[in-house]
Amino acid sequence: MAENPKILIIGTADTKGDELLYLKSRVEKAGGEGLVMDVGVLGDPPFTPDYTKHDVAEAAGTTNADIIALGGEHKAMVSQAKGARALTAKMHEQGAIDAMLAIGGSMATDLALDVADALPLGAPKIIVSTIASSAMIPPERLPADVLMLLWPGGLYGLNSVSRSVLSQGAGAVVGAVAGRDQSSEVRPLIGMTSLGSSTLKYMVHLKPEIEARGFELAVFHTTGLGGRAMESLARKGAFAAVMDFSLVEVSDHLFESPISAGADRLEGAGSAGVPQIVAPGGVTLVDLATWKDVPEQFADREFHIHNRFIACAKFNVEERVAAAKVIAKKVMMAKGPTAFIMPLRGIDEWDKEGGPFRSEDGLAAFAATIRDRVKAPATLIEIDAHINDKAFAETALAILDGWIEDGTIPRP
């Protein structure tokens, strides 16, 4: 950890001046150096920020007067977000800051998410927000490693409730800098998606084999934010390759499940040209919230109560075909090498012969749709095996080895 880590504190200094100064004092009490960036537009702050609203506007290629002239708070804050993002990224690249800590309501949170997205994985990014964990924040907006703290009592002015959270945020960001893993060992990273090993087991076979080839493996849990994190990292070029074997978030989004990784799930690696191997793990069901009423569309289905958060309803044949069409369309959008493995004996543990979500007709219809729509330049490999069979893992490794051999993926 650098001595006195430099923490960029972001907020609207005209309306949150006391809060920003309090945060600065708490950061410095924790051993850091607080640098305040004012992202306000109209008012003047009661102190001189380290980075003024004029600095932010300049970084966006405009002026504060021109931003005001846009004539609306939404347009103004979008422009400020552009400037704050550019300025923050530049400061981090130059080593002028180690982390960011932002505060605000919905407007400042909107801006702060853009700024956080500009920082690389591992640079601590904490947002203390009155809308943290709110359903109004779409998954597409969340950087892979952002930390959000709910800010109760923080809408206007300091009080014992809001100070308790602000002080935690200040301590957390300084501690996050101190606790960063500075390991010098860097291996090429492969991103993989999965559900728990009771449902999808291929990672158990694949992890040691992938590591033996000199790669590091990161497995993302496809319950919404896991897939979102992988998409975010894939777009930024974090992976040597992606093994996207659990696509339940794609079908969840299609059928308006609350467990969504966003509309662009299964597009990040492809749009970035990252080599990807795809398989349809988990696309036998839709995830619903256990604590909400069952949508009428799924009221007559077989259900599995996974826990107090998630309940799973079995797809019918038509829904499996609809999911296959969306998956195939996304696969065919890829700009980089893409292989699709279709296991013909089932695509999750519940889809085994005799399993509760088994549907011979549904699996056959899904496979036929994929067969009809996944064409060159993508490669379709159909295997007479279940996704949890060793044969599936061996097929994936054979593709990976071929790409290493022909230089598609650099040899570690």
Image (tube, rainbow, N blue to C red):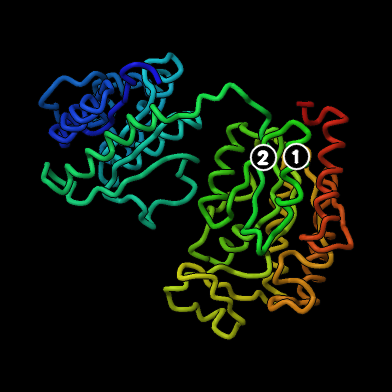
Numbered mark located on residue 69 in the image:
none
Would residue 181 be found to the left or right of residue 374 on screen? left
Q: Does 256 sit above or below residue 153?
A: below
Camera sees residue 353: yes
The quadrant in which residue 318 appears is bottom right
Which residue carries the number 2 mark? 217
The C terminus: image quadrant: top right
The amino acid beneath tag 2 is Leu
Would residue 106 be found to the left or right of residue 117 on screen? left
Q: Nearer the viewer, residue 372 or 216?
A: 216
Camera sees residue 72: no
Secondary structure of the residue carrying tag 2 is strand
Numbered mark located on residue 210 in the image:
1
Secondary structure of the residue carrying tag 1 is helix
Q: Does 166 sit above or below residue 290?
A: above
Counting from the top left corner in percent of width and height, residue 105 is at: 26, 45
> Image point 35% across, 30% down: which residue?
100
Is the residue under label 2 in contact with that under label 1 (CB below 8 Å)? yes
Q: Nearer the viewer, residue 41 or 25?
A: 25
> Image point 71% across, 57% down: which residue?
201
Counting from the top left corner in percent of width and height, residue 213 is at: 78, 33
Kindly report the distance in space between the C-alpha atoms of the residues bearing marks 1 and 2. Answer: 7 Å
Counting from the top left corner in percent of width and height, residue 188 is at: 68, 30
The amino acid beneath tag 1 is Ile
Counting from the top left corner in percent of width and height, residue 162 is at: 17, 45
Q: Does 374 sit above or below residue 251?
A: above
Upstream in sequence: badge 1 or badge 2? 1
The N terminus: image quadrant: top left
The quadrant in which residue 73 appears is top left
> Image point 45% across, 44% down: which residue?
141
